[in-house]
Amino acid sequence: MSDTFTLDGKTISFTEGQTIMQAATDAGVYIPHLCYLPELKPHGSCKLCTVKINGRETSSCTMRAAAGMVVESDTEEINSQRRALIHMLFVEGNHLCPTCEVSGNCKLQATAYHLGFMSPQFDHFFPIRRVDASHPDIWLDFNRCILCSLCVQASRDVDGKNVFGLSGRGIKSRLIVNSKSGKLADTDMAVTDKAAQVCPVGVILKKRTAFKTPIGERTYDKKPISEVPDTPAKER
Amino acid sequence: MTYNLETAEHPENLRRVSIDPVSRVEGHGKVTLLLDDHNKVHQVRLHIVEFRGFEKFIQGRPYWEVPVAVQRLCGICPVSHHLAASKAMDIIVGARKITPTAEKLRRLMHYGQMLQSHALHFFHLSTPDLLFGFDSEPTRRNIVGIAAAYPDLAKQGILLRKYGQEVIRMTAGKRVHGTGSVPGGVNKALTLAERDELLKDIYQIIGWSRDAVHLIQKIHTQDPGLYNSFGIFRSNFMSLAGNNGDMDFYHGALRARDDDGNIIFDGIDYQEYDRHIAEAVKPWSYMKFPYIRSLGQEEGWYKVGPLARVQNCDQISTPLAEHERREFVDYAGGSPMHAPLANHWTRMIEMLYAAEAIKELLHDDDILGTDLMTSGERQLEGVGVIEAPRGTLFHHYRVNEDDLITMANLIVSTTNNNQAMNEAVRHVAKRYLSGREVTEGLLNHIEVAIRAFDPCLSCATHALGKMPLTVELVDPDGSIVHALSRE
């Protein structure tokens, strides 16, 4: 049996136990998000999917839908906050879209375009981050990490390998590799692992595949992210 | 071969005049002159004031990123860097020979670039000097002035450039900074619709290119006193030469001649370029000074670019350009022409060749093929060389076992011409400025000599109309005695 709530004035059906994000996605309504993937347990960390429910802000990926909820998402006030979040993600890392092999397939870039965020106005941090290319098939570019932790979750919960982890606190938080050397080559990660498929940006990448899709044929060249929000990385 | 104006003996007693920045060239550079009380020139230097650092910050990045990253050196001829880097990476991935479809699509991209870059330089940057005169009214001496006085010519220049940009867009994905070329091949072929779209206008493009050759030929031959001697210096010259000595912008072996046209070396595999070419450093410029090792630093410098290429090759494979090459060689009288302004004439011959080569490729079904990439045994070091619009361009990389770059060396076309441009500037300064009151028109003579080489001083873009030129005459005590500015 399904019930309904309203999202930006539109009536959305849901089934018992669904989150607002799941119900909206089933109804074909896009709520911007970066750390949510349908096949993994939602954890509400990126805050991009924040909506207002009956006037209170909450993450739509973790909030269960309830009958009669009045949900606001695509409003100037909320989108302005989302732009600020995107803005901070861009300046906290080193996101050099012009030379990034994920450009055109990147969820961060595509979400920024969706929200009308074209150029940063905060000072860039230009953090010094490393590259780990020790693995024969996968390389890691930590410059682009947005700490969504999808890889941590996928490796632990799906692959059963626990290859990745988050270390540090606050602004010093960082993605690490769980091996004695800290190198990916010293883990049992394989290119077919779920953890290699979930990165929304350009951190976990299959080697020797870059730029083989021409401009015009990349995922978000063809359709905006609002129409293809959860395309798996391997298809992006 | 030098004019010995590089370093004054007693600079402390001389006045300094600077042209900063040099205008109607790509990127930023400046010229400084040291004059005595009688305006006699004692020192002239073309300085490159920007530092780019690509060779350093590409280190530690994966090799497949390089063709896309290093092209950001330049907004005018990024295709050159894109392809030179790709050719080096072909070696890295063991694809010394790429598929016919891939090579033809890369060639098409490159010829599109030669067309647009040469058109931009001739019509937008140089015709104001060539048609109005070097010391004509400066407010009119620009592309807007050309559009007012010669509207058809300006339109042709714009449309020629646009056509070249479209060729690039269809092969690289974007007009500027595309991603079409990848290690071991390309990522897309032309569609039938794209091929037909380009075919529609190619005959007009060839016609206009031929007209441009005839225009500059007429300008040059009508005033041989100026065009055959302005800024002249004798030097060695170098370029790639293709099969059978054909002109080839995309691939070939290194060939160098001395100032009389005698071969210094020929058939050199550019993978071994560093056994034949070395680079010197001077304290007053960020740009290095390359030279031919066997001749040493003093005698071994050389020029590259259109004038070098047209005289270095044995023939051009397309009929109209070959006819124009012969006209030029006949005019030169059997020995190499060294006049810098002859670069304009030869540049237009090259533009005609590029247009004809595009036409030939558009009639070749390989450009519609599906066999786009190849690879072989992985290598740790590779060199890619290409003839960029401004001359020979070297990219040299080492890659470690983890696929990361450990060393990069780029010798860009304008660097190859560094000494040559300095010599041209010194000749002009000595011939036209020395002993006379400095005027804007006279200073433009220096810029005309630099422009003949179409330098990309930093491999960077600049905005049209936003490059003010300020010239100041400063006394030894630092006070300005005379200033000229152009907004």
Image: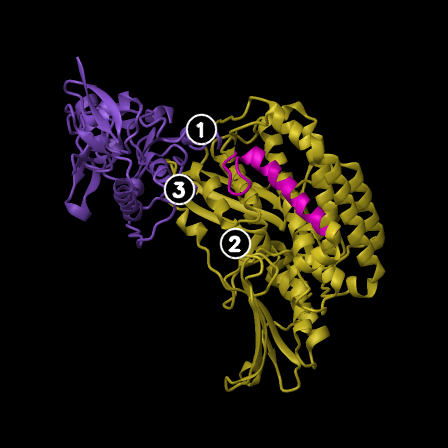
Chain colours: A purple, B yellow
Q: Residue at x 36, y 34 (%)?
A: A106
Chain containing the residue with disc 3 = A
Q: Is residue B39 above or below residue B124?
A: below
Graded by Cα atoms within 10 Å as few (under 14), some (14 to 19) or many (20 or more), the crowding at tag 1 reads: few
Q: Is residue B437 left or right of residue A38?
A: right
Q: Judging from the image, what secondary structure is the residue with disc 3 in?
A: helix
Task: Point out the image quarter for the N terminus of chain B.
Answer: bottom right
Picture layout, residue B365 above or below residue B276:
above
Asked whether B158 falls inside the magenta stretch, the response is: yes
Going from N to C along the chain, the mark reached first, 1 or 3, is 3
| Tag 1: amino acid | Lys
Secondary element at image label 2: loop
Instruction: Determine the secondary structure under disc 1.
Output: helix
Question: Are the residues under badges 1 and 2 in a single subunit?
Answer: no
- The residue pinned by badge 2 equals B460
Picture coordinates of residue B280, whole percent (x, y): 54, 60
Front-most of residues A11 and A25:
A11
Against B159, residue A225 (above or below) is: above
> Magenta: predominant secondary structure element?
helix
Reading the image, the residue beneath label 3 is: A97
Region rendered in magenta: B153-180
Picture disc at residue A222 = 1
Name which residue type carries label 3. Answer: Cys
Residue A178 picture location, percent across and down = 18, 34
Q: Residue at x 77, y 48 (%)?
A: B213
